Image: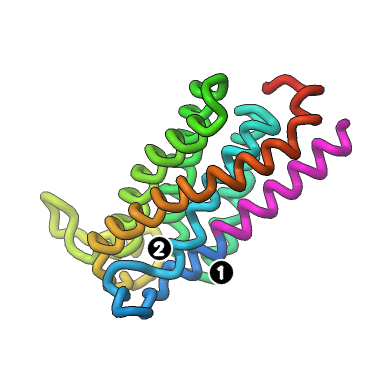
Amino acid sequence: MIGLDRRDFTIALAAMTVVVLSSNILVQYPFHAWGLQDYFTWGAFTYPFSFLVTELANRRFGPKGARRIVYVGFALAVVLSVILATPRIAIASGSAFLTAQLLDISIFSRLRNRAWWLPPFASSTISAAVDTMIFFSLAFYCGTLPGTSQTIDGLLAKVGIVDQCIALPWTTLAIADYGVKLALSIFSILPYGLVLRLMRPALMQRSPA
């Protein structure tokens, strides 16, 4: 059983790292098909699956195990994103990811004994809104901060992080991105249910932590 836990934990951690890292790279590239470059980036279609990974981990390992995956996945994704994306994207992603995923775990845990589809749908819907707001404002807002003459790039420069803001229409991107997250939250209910059925033998032997 310990071996199974370690294998499943490794799979969940790898899935989380791949989803977040690929999203941090893809979010820098607008989705040009059908003239939608002002509304979507490629990352909009990959990042929502991080919530699916968290929710399945929560169901499989309980809140403590899910938080472990979030913490380790957060560290790996931020380090790799600094190398493969940009420091600002990494900071924005890390801040949004950690806040939203821990909120997702908390909401899911409160609802875990309700109808099987309700915990993942409610937790991802609410936490995705928080994630979107934090990420896009930190990653792509290039103006001065309210009440100051300071920009986010200027603040980063003061601590030795030199990065240039990528000027994208972040408000429309954020709204459209959240719409995609909502759609994928509904879509992911089906794979969540299928994987949950496969996990039931292990869940019958182990109560959540």
Q: In the rendered view, would you say 205 is above or below 162?
A: above
Comes first in the chain, label 1 or label 2: 1
Label drawn at residue 88? 2
Residue 54 x/y as whole percent:
58, 41
Residue 87 x/y as whole percent:
45, 64
Residue shown at 48% from the left, 35% from the top? 104
Scheme by which the image is coloured: rainbow
Residue 72 covered by magenta stretch: no
Q: Nearer the viewer, residue 93 or 132?
A: 132
Residue 194 x/y as whole percent:
66, 43
Residue shown at 50% from the left, 23% from the top? 111
Residue shown at 49% from the left, 21% from the top? 110
Q: In the rendered view, would you say 61 is above or below 153?
A: above
Residue 2 covered by magenta stretch: yes
Question: Which quadrant holds residue 141?
Answer: bottom left
Q: Which residue is mark 1?
A: 83
Total labels drawn: 2
Quadrant for the C terminus in the image = top right
Residue 134 x/y as whole percent:
34, 49
